[in-house]
Image: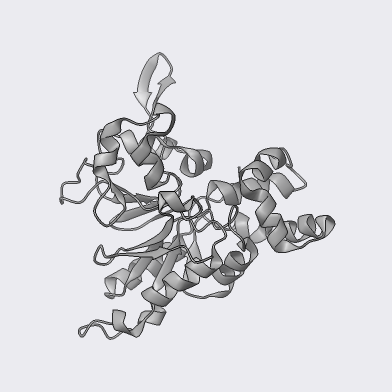
Amino acid sequence: MSAIHRDERLERVIQQALDDGRSVWVVGDIHGHLKTFKALLDILWHPLQKRETDEHDPSEDLVICLGDLIDRGPDSQGVLELVRDTDNIHSIRGNHDEMLRLSVSPKHGKMMKSWLKYGGVETLQSFSDDPDEQIEIAREWLPFIEGLPTELILNGHRLVHAGYDLSPVWKGQNLIDKTLEDQTNKDRMWSRTIFTATSPPDPERQVIVGHTTVQALSRDVDGIWGSELEKQVLECGIWASDVLLEDGRESVLGIDTGVYLSTEEEPRLTALNLQNGAVHIQTVVD
């Protein structure tokens, strides 16, 4: 795994925006759905979002993507370009972004089969129709992807793609729970155990994740999660832990609302405002 973990400069920018009263929108997994992402941005940055007490232009509000910018959808390259080229859009790294890195990097290349199976084909096709050009262009995106942090830590929030692996591990002769300090980039991009945490992963901060769709939590895929998790899907469509912080906030929120899923599963893209908890949902238009 790449050594990049946090981007403290970006953390300071986000925290300052919150301290100044500006909206900071966190967006779930986009998976190459550029038109849907743009439609959501039109909502978030619309002048009507401006409050009477707010001096800021909504189009200057920050947008933080929770990773998985690519794969499955029709225009992964377009999503990458939009995030890279827009000053107030930023992203952390998800496992699909990481799969591209591990598949096309000359130092790796061992995940190509899995990546192609889980959406990499669509990403390569968005780069070019020529197979040789596809890999060449994919490699041009390696510096950008390697520069994406795997979590952002703010005063009141942690933004991370998958969550944290909170399962017990052996340390010497003792079986103890992994701490936040024990987490690896792989844990932050691939784990799923945060949804069954019985205590706050971070007692001081609300953790906001993508990676696992609300729809999957609702239908208890493969019996991984208990049926009780379905009851924790809020009316606004996001998932909320019933384990609370001392300030009354849910300790974990899940905002991946399955933009790539079938029509029957109500695919959509969701944004959460860190400033006030507002949620905006965009149905798929790609």
Kindly give the residue lying farthest to the top in the view shown: 173
Q: Residue at x 62, y 63 (%)?
A: 75
Q: Is residue 111 above or below residue 98?
A: above
User: In which quadrant of the rendered view does residue 24 lie?
Assistant: bottom left
**Depth order, front residue of 224/92:** 224
Q: Residue at x 28, y 71 (%)?
A: 19
Q: Residue at x 64, y 64 (%)?
A: 77
Does 90 sit left or right of 110 as displayed? Answer: left
**Depth order, front residue of 260/18:** 260
Q: Residue at x 63, y 46 (%)?
A: 99
Q: Taking the image as drawn, is residue 129 in sight? A: yes
User: In which quadrant of the rendered view does residue 137 lie?
Assistant: bottom right
**Depth order, front residue of 252/156:** 252
How many numbered marks are there? Answer: 0
For the C terminus, which image quadrant? bottom right
Q: Position of residue 41 (x, y in %)?
A: 43, 73
Does 116 sit left or right of 24 as displayed? Answer: right
For the N terminus, which image quadrant? top right
Q: Is residue 26 above or below residue 177?
A: below
Q: Position of residue 14 (x, y in %)?
A: 38, 67
User: In which quadrant of the rendered view does residue 12 lie?
Assistant: bottom left
**Depth order, front residue of 159/58:** 58
The figure's colour scheme reads one colour
Q: Position of residue 28 (x, y in %)?
A: 43, 57
Q: Taking the image as drawn, is residue 200 in sight? A: no
Q: Position of residue 6 (x, y in %)?
A: 48, 54
Does 153 sit left or right of 80 as displayed? Answer: left
Q: Is residue 146 above or below residue 196?
A: below
